[in-house]
Image: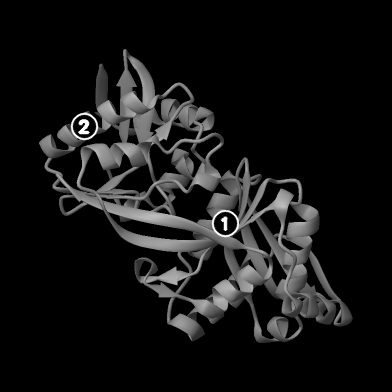
Amino acid sequence: MFEIRKYTQENKNAWDVFVRNSINATFLFLRDYMDYHSYRFYDFSLMIYRKGKLFALLPANIDGGVLYSHQGLTYGGLLIDRKATTVEIVDLWSLMNDYLKDNGISCVIYKPIPFIFQNIPAQEDLYALFRTTNAQLIGRNMSATIYQDNKIKFIESRKSGIRKAIANDIQVRQSDDWKGFWDILDENLKNKYGAAPVHKLDEILILKEKFPKNIKLYLAYKGEKPVGGSVLYITQRVVHTQYISANLEGKEMGALDLLFDYLINQEYCNYPIFDFGTSNEEMGRVLNEPLIFQKEGFGGRGVACDIYQYTL
């Protein structure tokens, strides 16, 4: 009933059309996003057909006999349309595992799409994992998320930061000063963690040019100087903070408190969900408590972002 084919560049248009109509895909699965760092990964994405018609997609890469869904993306998962049923997904999963074994894959690391990004319920993949594999939960990161129609009020320290920012005449607006923000972000990550942003500046500039409606930068300014900001990834239902950072001056003046008050309660108040992203390291075993405290202070509450592993 199903036919599985490995994705090739010739299938780009068919892939993208399916992504745009899928019930659980976001723009991150469009090939122009997936392929910006294709040189880092050996792509092994799958296209699944049913009776000759494209039925599902699995964005994936392989490394050393392990299939990942997908190492270059925050989340992966099987992409489906609204006609897919539980029985079909269970049958597909068994066939897909046979296909992977035949192609030398011995292990699968699977990152399902968090439910907040689904346009309608689409967790048939989790049931198929349970029914057809020995999948074990190997990671669980915690995201802090706001439902805009049922918001929790900001805690007093966030309100105090807003008052401080207003007193210091901090101004918030959308900006194209990506280098100014990346300088702040680079410095913060280097000082705190000895790390660098996942995206290099030239990479994020390429992506925002390709996806101008989905990737936006908002900065908090003291005069004409940026002192903090956030990069937003905007999908159909969710406004997600991909990056958040402020310099020392911005932190002292409550710049991010004013910024998120504006984003949550004004600019994007009509979107169903505002998501701050995860606050973890080491597959969730380490929780950055000051970071999640900040996000929870704006009313964010927990959404689990899971990672599974199973052998073939």
Which of the 4 quarters of the picture holds residue 222?
Answer: bottom right
Residue 44 shows up from this direction: no
**Residue at left offset 66%, top offset 86%:** 248
**Residue at left offset 21%, top offset 29%:** 95
Marks counted in the figure total: 2
Whole-number angstrom distance, CA of label 1 to CA of label 2? 40 Å
- Viewer-proximal residue, 58 or 223? 58
**Residue at left offset 36%, top offset 38%:** 125
Q: Which residue is mark 2?
A: 94
Residue 70 shows up from this direction: yes
- Viewer-proximal residue, 215 or 68? 68
Q: Which residue is mark 1?
A: 205
Q: Callout 2, which amino acid? A: Ser
The percent coordinates of residue 249 (x first, y second) are 71, 86
**Badge number at residue 245:** none
Instruction: From this view, report whether residue 297 is shown above or below residue 21.
Output: below
Q: Image check: 207 left or right of 110?
A: right
Q: Image check: 235 left or right of 194?
A: right
Q: Image check: 138 left or right of 230?
A: left
